[in-house]
Amino acid sequence: MTSINYCIRMNLLINTTMSRSSIKNGLGLVALLISLYFPPEPGGGSITAWNRALILQKLGYTVFVLCGFPSYPAGKVINPKYKGKFFYVEKFENITLIRLRLLPLKSKGYLRRVILFMNFISLSFVYIPRILKISNEISLVYALAPMLFSSFIGFIYSKITKSFFIYEVSFLWPEELIAFRTSLHFTLSFGKILAKISYTLPDMLVTISEFAAQYLSTNYKPKAMIYALPIGVEPSFLIVGEGEEKSKLEDIKLAHRLNNLFFLPFQDSAFVPDIIYSADVCVVPLSPDPIYNATIPTKFFDYLACHKPQIGICGEELAMIINSNKIGLTVKDKEIDKLVDGILSLKNSPSLISSMEHNSHAVLQEFSLNNLASKFNKVLKKEIMSKEKEK
């Protein structure tokens, strides 16, 4: 399951003292968001892109999204409206989507994902004239990882349009890749060189956590400002996704004859809130590798939006959020006895669960999109003004 996003409806006062060059053709501020994945596709990448599009809208931008046809993770485009199309423009919740057809490959395994991503980057370059004609006068380019080559294509678009460029490092490549696939250690040195170059291109870097921001600052020392912008929550929209690890978990169930463990197939988004609400407590597991201390999984926001107490198998930033706000309990990897004790303590204390549910409701406001957008707006305006003064 991926993220539910939540916000309170309110008006933001947008400072419009931008340069006149960013306000043309009656469109006002125009942003181009570049993301391989976008709804209705499942997965964290799709949720993050949708989240950022909403935030840009709240900042007063007319948003265009450059993305692939919806085919993740199976690699098949099912909706008949895309049949025979290779380039497709459509509206989605007042956002204009510019979709590119990708190779029919399952998003499974590192090599296939690289091929798909390079396919997307190549088409993004080939279709530049057509895309710019549709999106008109762009004043901001916002490129999302999963791979650092997003920075390069975003840089190209920003240079052509003379716009402000933001690169979001939602995936610490190559570090997270190496942690996940130890057989790829030989790519670390070369990957870090490419990463360092990619971090020199944007006018501003965005991460999803403070830990990730500190990691970039310490290890790569980019000149651009680094801003931590959490995913945030908005319960009016939800996407459910499948993951690569599901088949491995099913194998474990069979091997250990775990008759009390069940797997649900892909669910319609309308049912997901009911599934989460049916639980008393939700678990947020993270890999024990130190690089994942920079990650706040989208499922954390799913559970937060449903006011569910959370057991985090994690460390660093996510553990700090859970513990400091008293919205759950945390243990570290392999602390099995402590995990069992935590589950039993919650099971035997309805008042503790009630308290954590109440605290979750309060914390939710901190991660509302309006709150995040308001904070981000102040920083973004300052950086844009600074960049214009340099020119």
Image (tube, rainbow, N blue to C red):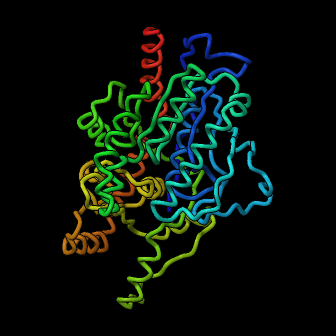
Q: Quadrant of residue 32?
A: top right
Whether residue 245 is visible: yes
Is residue 134 placed above or below 292 in the rendered structure? above
Relative to 80, 37 lies left or right: left
Estimate the x, y position of residue 259 in percent, counting from the top left. Answer: 42, 89
Estimate the x, y position of residue 44 in percent, counting from the top left. Answer: 49, 54
Q: Quadrant of residue 81?
A: bottom right
Relative to 216, 253 lies left or right: right
Is residue 161 placed above or below 293 in the rendered structure? above
For image coordinates 53% across by 55% down, the residue present is 115
For image coordinates 73% across by 42% down, the residue present is 91
Q: Quadrant of residue 210?
A: top left
| Closer to the camera in the image, 307 or 301 | 301
Whether residue 352 is visible: no
For image coordinates 47% across by 60% down, the residue present is 111
| Closer to the camera in the image, 229 or 291 | 291
Estimate the x, y position of residue 34 in percent, counting from the top left. Answer: 57, 39
For image coordinates 47% across by 76% down, the residue present is 247
Relative to 370, 84 lies left or right: right
